[in-house]
Image: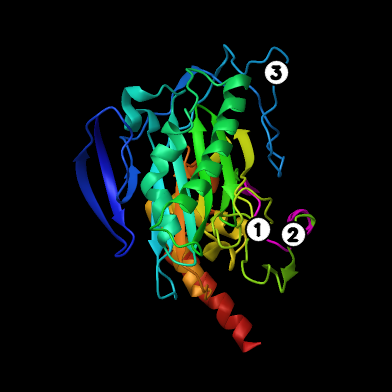
Amino acid sequence: MIVEAEVVRQQTFTALDVQYFAKGASVHEIDDVINVSPRRLAQVLVPDSVAAELPSSQVDITSVDKLSDGTLESTILQFVPSIRSGSFADIGPRRYMEDEHIRIDDLSSYLGSLFKFPKPSAFYGVFDGHGGPEAAAYIRKNVMRLFFEDVSFPQAANVDNIFLEDVENSLRKAFLLADQALAADCSVSSSSGTTALTAFIFGRLLMVANAGDCRAVLCRKGEAIDMSQDHRPIYPSERKRVEELGGYIDDGYLNGVLSVSRALGDWDMKIPRGSPSPLIADPEFRQVVLTEDDEFLIIGCDGIWDVMSSQHAVSIVRRGLWRHDDPEQCAKDLVMEALRRNTFDNLTVIIVCFSSLDHRELSPPRQRKQRYCSLSAEALCSLRNLLDGNANH
């Protein structure tokens, strides 16, 4: 398997274009954040693998409508996303960088013949660590094994209801296995933890799994649509669950310590192992079928969302794509805007584009052209006499 990869070293935040060669039949560990971007896929019309549609005005997207015959296939030619992405990370005002991320625009090519997925396929993740960098670094390093090998990730040529259910079950299992792996690894402090948000694209299906306060936001015709819920202890549904399991909320913090109610790791708050805990690693899922109205997805850690709304972030990225069509620069622009707004956290952003924006729709209003006319010498003389006459009065 030969993969062209862009490696971003989180300590220096300097992007390096490199080529590396992975050999063997197993999914390897990742020593650096891996950004795999193939040549830009052409936007084509092919038999659609997912026919169910959600209304474009639907703001809270939770699930894909399922057909009565149990399949989402259609013989109608439909939109297929043209996937490309960019990312940017910055330490912000913190002393240490605890964020990690991964982006793979062509998952099928990356995994080679090991897995068979609907095309196009892509995988993205942001892991926002706390209590030290160990937990987030461990998840990033082992993410391909944890999410694909250890859970026997489902395979299929097309997206149908069975595949949807199997993917969700597999991802839930992967989050919980990752949580257990952090407890078992002696190199990870029991006080270290990480939030985790992953986004998968299979054909036209976008599925987001989230545990924590990272956020994924879909831009649909300029409208921001949250594809995840921030798991904060103060939110009513999370507060109820926490209190039912014996936890408490103190000044917005779980048990007076943690600002999130779901995370991987943090085993000093989950002991004894196997007992019900107010802090859980279970992800929540949201999924949607992409259409030609869907422009891009923003995935960011809470350092972004602490200082700007989902809609404001969408507007910044949309304006940037119209200007230069560069998702990497848009990710940097979001980070710079968050710093300008005095965020107090590490910053990581991934921008995933599904197609080129329609510049005609987003183009600024045309300025009125000034029109000029010429006057003959006789007309000019008459105009001067008229003006002089008015001045004498």
Q: Secondary structure at mark 2?
A: loop
Q: Residue furthest bottom?
A: 392
Q: Is residue 89 left or right of residue 200?
A: left
The image shows residue 122 at horizontal and vertical percentages of 44, 35
Residue 224 is covered by the magenta coloring: yes
The image shows residue 30 at horizontal and vertical percentages of 32, 46
The image shows residue 67 at horizontal and vertical percentages of 70, 18
For label 1, the crowd category at 10 Å Cα-Cα, with few meaning under 14, some 14 to 19 and many 20 or more, is many
Which tag, 1 or 2, sits closer to the chain's start?
2
Where is residue 136, by image quadrant?
bottom left
Distance (Cα) linking label 1 and label 3: 35 Å
User: On the rendered image, what quadrant is the C terminus found in?
Assistant: bottom right
Q: Residue furthest front?
A: 272
Where is residue 133, by image quadrant?
bottom left
Which tag, 3 or 2, sits closer to the chain's start?
3
Foreground of the two, 120 or 169:
169
Instruction: Evaluate if marks 3 and 2 touch, with contact meaning CB atoms under 8 Å apart.
Output: no
**Label ID, residue 235:** 2
User: Identity of the amino acid at label 1?
Assistant: Ser
Magenta residues span 223-243
Tell me: residue 70, above or below residue 147: above
* In front: label 3 or label 2: 2
User: Identity of the amino acid at label 2?
Assistant: Tyr
* In front: label 1 or label 2: 1
Mark 1 lies on residue = 261
User: Identity of the amino acid at label 3?
Assistant: Leu
Tell me: residue 242, above or below residue 92: above
Mark 3 lies on residue = 67
Q: Secondary structure at mark 1?
A: loop
Distance (Cα) linking label 1 and label 2: 9 Å
Residue 318 is covered by the magenta coloring: no
